[in-house]
Amino acid sequence: VVTARAAGDGIFITAYTHDGLHQASVNVSVLPYVAVQGVRVTPQVIVFDAIGQTKLVVATVVPSNATDQVVTWESTDSTVATVDSSGLVTAKAVGSGVFITAFTRDGLHQASVNVSVDPIVPPHGARRGFTRRARP
């Protein structure tokens, strides 16, 4: 087991056989740890106009060189909108006030998207996209 104690490079670790006739070496570099300072999501608001629609939400960990870039996703109401591990949000049912949240792995930072599902329902007997024009 090798345990890093500080950042650095050019460190060689060598293992020898009991008889001393064979050896193997590896060059080890230890990168400095860069702490996560926050996370942002885009877009910040999603309004779906049809059940089944999808939209990708992108989480950006700050700073961009933070050591741990992993986020997890949650929905406050998965009956209305779900989110998968890559941030793909899917409209499941009519509803509003649902938050899709990205959490940093350390649990110290989060950012949310406000999601609503409000299908467009045409007037009875009208086709979707149909607009009635006034007569001159």
Image (tube, helix red, strand yellow):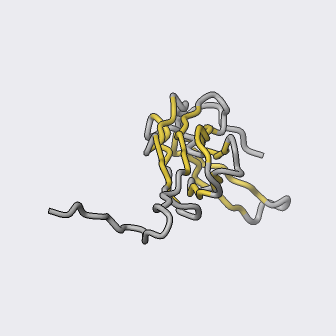
At which x and y percent is residue 49? Answer: 48, 57
Q: Residue at x 61, y 37 (%)?
A: 104
Residue 41 or residue 61, whichever sits in front? 41
**Residue 71 falls left or right of residue 18:** left
Above-or-below relation of 80 to 44? below
Classify residue 128 by image quadrant.
bottom left
Task: Quadrant for the C terminus, please.
Answer: bottom left
Is residue 80 visible in the rendered structure shown here? yes
Residue at (68% x, 40% y) in the render: 76
Question: Most extreme residue toward the right, as rendered?
Answer: 18
Quadrant in which residue 96 is drawn: top right
Decide if residue 10 is on the left or right side of residue 85.
left
* Residue at figure coordinates x 71%, y 61% from the top left: 23
Identify the residue shown where x is 66% and y is 45%: 75
On screen, 98 above or below 134?
above
Classify 77 as above or below 17: above
Query: Closest to the observer: 36 or 38?
Result: 38
Q: Give the percent coordinates (x, y) of residue 121.
A: 50, 59
User: How many labels were placed on the picture?
Assistant: 0
